[in-house]
């Protein structure tokens, strides 16, 4: 009975470790994204508590106090919708989503301070900011579609904030703003920092509104430009500064994606065997060597795989330490080139089935294979001569069969 417990306990502990490893694949982006989405939905729900007025009554001749109240609640709604959108981007560990989340949280914090909401909402925004900043390196994915979507949504949001804000506070400007066309014109002129001076804020409330529009708007535009144009500018500068670093035309080659000891040793073996391959290295690793075919980037990014020549590649090896990332690499590779063969590494045995569902042609679990080889060696079995260079010492005597 004692022997059965000893045998079963390691199995249970192994399952528990695999379960913990599976949960760890969702940390920290899933909990953070859930918290941001919850905060955004809360902002939207709070805005519904405001007095709803027909659009025909939203005249710039409304009382200033009521105009400010309508503006503050519409700001909450816009911020709430923005937080929900970027929250879904955080689920996929997008760098653009992290940048816009920080900006929107700062704006939310400022709005709560202006409105003197000193309760749980300002504490929530402050805590989320403190959580987001140290987790920057966990959100490093770059995809063009996501960057464009998040950037355009944020730009439209700030334009709506400036247009409707200046319209509602129209009597606080000189000359007064009476229509949406003029308020849109004022928003564009303000955000472009042209400063024609034909429309000026003359009350403390409108001046504070213009200051908030400038700070928030310029931050959003700067982040949008960096998210959309940053990768392209970096690539162009690399070609200009290192014109000889270009690779030869890639065809029928292997793409090795992922980081960790398995990927590193696989790269050594491929190099020793003179096989044509490209290795995708994350920025967290050592500097890539273009002469060896290394490129820098996230292997789950479409642009990075295209740069690695996925369209004409013969095989993709997804050899990361994270099974979820290996699944993303497999799915993207098959989408970009349905004919490419994908060899996916399963770090946990229970991930083999999920990687097959991700359309991997072959799934390999090196830890399971290594464990079986160790057990064979312990029983005195011989292994193939091809692996003799990996062993040192004499083998064990054949273990007697257990009855």
Image: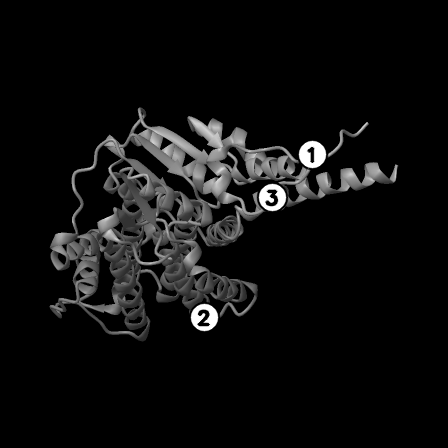
Q: CA distance from mark 3 to mark 2?
A: 73 Å
- Pair 3/2: label in front: 3
Q: In the rendered image of this protein, does residue 65 appear above or below residue 278?
A: below
Do the CB atoms of the residues marked 3 and 2 lie less than 8 Å apart?
Answer: no
Residue carrying label 2: 113
- In the image, residue 397 lies at what x, y percent? 68, 37
Determine whether, in the image, residue 140 is placed left or right of residue 248: right
In the picture, measured across the screen, residue 276 lies left or right of residue 196, that is: right
State the mark number for residue 203: none
The one of 356 and 373 positioned closer to us in this rendering: 373
> In this rendering, is residue 18 above or below 205?
above
The C terminus: image quadrant: top right
Q: Which mark is residue 394?
A: 3
> Residues under labels 1 and 2: Cα distance?
76 Å
Residue at 45%, 30% in the rendered image: 358
- Please give the name of the residue rendered at 39% of the width and 32% of the height, measured from the top-left corner: 331
Camera sees residue 92: no
Residue 97, percent from left and from top: 37, 52
Earlier sequence position, callout 3 versus callout 2:
2
Q: Residue at label 1? A: 398
Residue 153 place in picture, x, y as percent: 31, 48
Relative to the observer, which residue lies in front, 317 or 135? 317
Badge 1 element: loop
Quarter holding residue 234: bottom left
* Circle 2 crowding by C-alpha within 10 Å: few under 14, some 14–19, many from 20: few
Which residue corresponds to the image point at 44% horizontal and 64% vertical from the top-left? 133
**How many neighbours does mark 3 have within 10 angstroms: few (below 14), some (14-19), or many (20 or more)?**
few
Return the residue nearer the eye: 99 or 75: 99
Residue name at image x 62 percent, y 42 percent: 18
Would you place residue 117 above or below residue 161 in this image? below
In this orientation, which residue lies closer to the viewer: 131 or 231?
231
């Amino acid at each position: 009975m004692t022997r059965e417990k000893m045998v079963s306990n390691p199995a249970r502990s192994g399952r528990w470790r695999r379960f913990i490893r599976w949960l760890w694949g969702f940390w920290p982006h899933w909990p953070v994204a859930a918290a941001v989405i919850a905060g955004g939905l809360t902002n939207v729900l709070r805005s519904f508590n405001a007095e709803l007025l027909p659009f025909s009554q939203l005249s710039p001749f409304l009382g200033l106090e009521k105009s400010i109240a309508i503006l503050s609640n519409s700001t909450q709604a816009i911020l709430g919708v923005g937080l929900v959108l970027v929250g879904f981007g955080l689920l996929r560990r997008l760098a653009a989503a992290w940048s816009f989340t920080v900006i929107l949280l700062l704006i939310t914090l400022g709005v709560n301070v202006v409105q003197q909401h000193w309760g749980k909402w300002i504490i929530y925004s402050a805590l989320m900011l403190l959580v987001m900043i140290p987790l920057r390196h966990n959100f490093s994915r770059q995809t063009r579609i996501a960057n464009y979507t998040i950037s355009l949504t944020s730009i439209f949001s700030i334009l709506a904030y400036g247009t409707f804000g200046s319209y509602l506070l129209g009597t606080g400007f000189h000359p007064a703003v009476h229509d949406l066309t003029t308020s849109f014109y004022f928003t564009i002129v303000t955000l472009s920092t042209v400063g024609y001076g034909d429309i000026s804020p003359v009350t403390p409330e409108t001046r504070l509104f213009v200051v908030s529009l400038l700070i928030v708007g310029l931050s959003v535009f700067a982040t949008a430009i960096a998210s959309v144009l940053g990768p392209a500018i970096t690539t162009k500068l690399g070609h200009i500064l290192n014109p000889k670093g270009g690779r030869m035309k890639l065809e029928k080659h292997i793409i090795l994606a992922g980081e960790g000891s398995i990927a590193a040793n696989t790269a050594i073996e491929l190099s020793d065997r003179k096989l044509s391959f490209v290795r995708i290295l994350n920025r967290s690793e050592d500097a890539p060597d273009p002469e060896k075919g290394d490129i820098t980037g996230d292997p789950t990014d479409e642009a990075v795989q295209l740069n690695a020549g996925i369209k004409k590649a013969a095989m993709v090896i997804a050899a990361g330490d994270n099974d979820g990332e290996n699944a993303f690499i497999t799915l993207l590779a098959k989408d970009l080139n349905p004919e490419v063969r994908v060899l996916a590494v399963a770090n946990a045995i229970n991930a083999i089935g999920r990687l097959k569902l991700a359309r991997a042609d072959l799934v390999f679990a090196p830890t399971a294979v290594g464990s079986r080889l160790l057990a064979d060696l312990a029983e005195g079995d011989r292994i193939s001569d091809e692996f003799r260079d990996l062993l040192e010492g004499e083998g064990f005597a054949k273990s007697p069969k257990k009855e």
